[in-house]
Image (cartoon, helix red, strand yellow):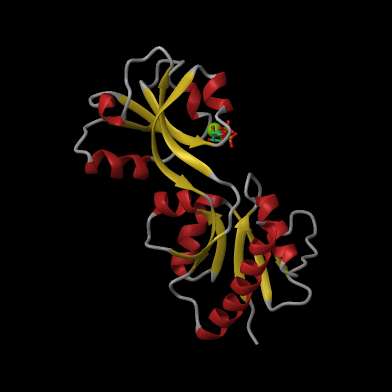
């Protein structure tokens, strides 16, 4: 019988909760340090530890069959990857923010201005929809510093507690989307592995019900 290959975030905000939900559904993993792939002890599952941003492409190519990933990453990377379950953790917003003294109060007010973001495709989608012309600067991290160093007039990034915005003198002016961790599935998954995924999904639903 073949194993279901499931990707989780290697390190970062989703990792701990992802490993916890796998454990809660009875999938225990002996993960040696720095091991990027590990088999579950008592379930036909292999866990791959990957970088967030790489996961959508691996799903698309069928390198992994499923993944625990932020919905916002799926949206940013496109590829029409579907998810089968919302997992109720890692809830966040993807928002537009500006310096607190700025008069801008929506994305529209950033027309002709510079926006720094790690989510250029997401922002582009909203700019196109609203017929706004703005300049996008892609930054991979610490986006909130951009207005302070004169690199941008506004930013688009993840907001969770809001503390990073606050500490950098920024205010949220528009929420583009809300996100949480989801169980995503590869369009290439075969029937045998789909059956394993359905079992996992069923167990996840029971665990999530118990958590509410
Ligand atoms: C993330 C995100 C925001 C912040 C949001 O950054 O990019 O900056 O967390 O969380 P908060 O609203 O609770 O402050 P992270 O700390 O992961 O670092 P990075 O942007 O440098 O990757
Ligand atoms: Mg950040």
Give how far across and how far down residue 48 sits, in percent: 64, 63
Residue 115 seen from this side: yes
Left or right placement of residue 179 versus residue 101 in this view: right
Which residue appears at 53% of the width and 29% of the height?
142
Q: Quadrant of the C terminus?
A: bottom right
Q: Quadrant of ligand 1?
A: top right
Left or right placement of residue 57 versus residue 90 in this view: left
Q: Nearer the viewer, residue 54 or 147?
A: 147
Left or right placement of residue 171 versus residue 205 in this view: left
Relative vertical location of residue 125 with respect to residue 151 in this rendering, above or below = below
Which residue appears at 51% of the width and 85% of the height?
191
Residue ranking furthest to the top: 101
Q: Nearer the viewer, residue 18 or 104?
A: 104
The image quarter containing residue 87 is: bottom right
The image quarter containing residue 37 is: bottom right
Give how far across and how far down residue 202 sits, in percent: 61, 74
Give how far across and how far down residue 123 sits, in percent: 34, 39
Give how far across and how far down residue 40 sits, in percent: 74, 71
Which residue appears at 77% of the width and 65% of the height?
29
The number of numbered discs placed on residues in the rendered structure image is: 0
Which residue appears at 64% of the width and 78% of the height?
3
Relative vertical location of residue 24 with respect to residue 203 in this rendering, above or below = above
Relative vertical location of residue 5 with respect to residue 86 in this rendering, above or below = below
Residue ranking furthest to the left: 131
Q: Quadrant of the N terminus?
A: bottom right
Residue 140 seen from this side: no
């Amino acid at each position: 019988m073949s194993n279901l290959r499931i990707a989780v975030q290697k390190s970062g905000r989703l990792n701990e909760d992802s490993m916890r939900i796998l454990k809660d559904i009875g999938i225990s993993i002996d993960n040696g340090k720095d091991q990027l792939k590990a088999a579950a002890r008592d379930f036909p599952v292999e866990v791959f530890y990957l970088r967030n941003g790489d996961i959508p492409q691996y799903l698309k190519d069928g390198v992994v069959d499923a993944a625990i990933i932020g919905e916002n990453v799926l949206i940013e990377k496109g590829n029409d990857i579907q998810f089968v379950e919302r997992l109720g953790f890692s809830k966040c917003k993807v928002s537009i923010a500006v310096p607190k003294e700025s008069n801008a109060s929506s994305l529209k007010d950033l027309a002709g201005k510079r926006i720094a973001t790690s989510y250029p495709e997401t922002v582009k989608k909203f700019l196109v929809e609203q017929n706004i012309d703005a300049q996008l600067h892609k930054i991979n991290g610490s986006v909130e510093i951009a207005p302070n160093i004169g690199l941008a007039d506004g930013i688009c990034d993840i907001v969770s507690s809001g503390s990073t915005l606050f500490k950098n003198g920024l205010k949220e002016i528009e929420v583009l989307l809300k996100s949480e961790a989801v169980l995503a599935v590869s369009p290439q998954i075969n029937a045998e592995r789909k059956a394993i995924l359905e079992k996992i999904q069923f167990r996840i639903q029971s665990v999530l019900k118990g958590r509410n």
